[in-house]
Amino acid sequence: DGGITQSPKYLFRKEGQNVTLSCEQNLNHDAMYWYRQDPGQGLRLIYYSQIVNDFQKGDIAEGYSVSREKKESFPLTVTSAQKNPTAFYLCASRWDGALHFGNGTRLTVT
Amino acid sequence: QKEVEQNSGPLSVPEGAIASLNCTYSDRGSQSFFWYRQYSGKSPELIMFIYSNGDKEDGRFTAQLNKASQYVSLLIRDSQPSDSATYLCAVRGGGFKTIFGAGTRLFVKA
């Protein structure tokens, strides 16, 4: 089955710790994206990547980092510099103009 | 800042009625317009896209686009309780960034 897999579904971390969210796709899509969603708000773009070994900052990149070493993988690291990391994180790939999302990772930092 | 605006709702309609969801956008250069449905706790799912002025129908869904007025809408005919969800409007310009509205909560009463 083709799709976008995010793991884990739920993640709990202590404040001050870095954490990496996984995003894997087997759709052979070039473009991949990370969004963040907070309650009552729309999706906000963190980072995006058009091709392997290249990525660009989105609107809220501070406190986050990414890598794109393989076409299939686009992991997101939430660093201790991110002031409010608790959120629902969504990874997507783009096909024929539209974004298609994974199931998301809900991160809670206490 | 390019924006996408939606009424947060909730919009409440009786079962079998037409639900009308509206969205305005600020970037006149926007080229692609999307509607996503998001159930509580889940990731967004693409339900419609439209690129040209006018109407586009797919089953019970109709997307309407008016670029002169910078307005896009989604009509859901014969609304069902299973249509109860948050509907996100998304807009993409000529580049790679897709901007999302905060969403409209729809509640279909049985």
Image: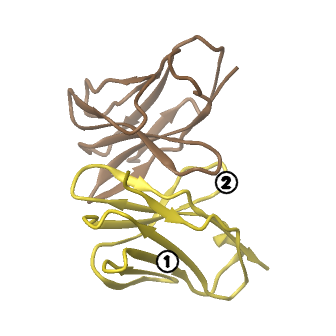
Chain colours: A brown, B yellow
Image quadrant assignment for residue B65: bottom left
Mark 2 or mark 1, whichever is nearer to me: 1
Place of residue B76 in the rendered image (x, y in percent of width and height, measured from the top left): 56, 81
Q: As drawn, is B88 to the left or to the right of B91? A: right
Q: Nearer the viewer, residue B82 or B54?
A: B54
- Rendered view: B5 above or below A5: below
State which chain disc 1 sits on: B
**Disc 2 secondary structure class:** loop
> Which label is found at residue B40?
2
> Which label is found at residue B74?
1
**Disc 1 secondary structure class:** strand
Q: CA distance from mark 2 to mark 1?
A: 20 Å
Outermost front residue: B1
State which chain disc 2 sits on: B
Q: Residue at x 31, y 80 (%)?
A: B68
Image quadrant assignment for residue A54: top left
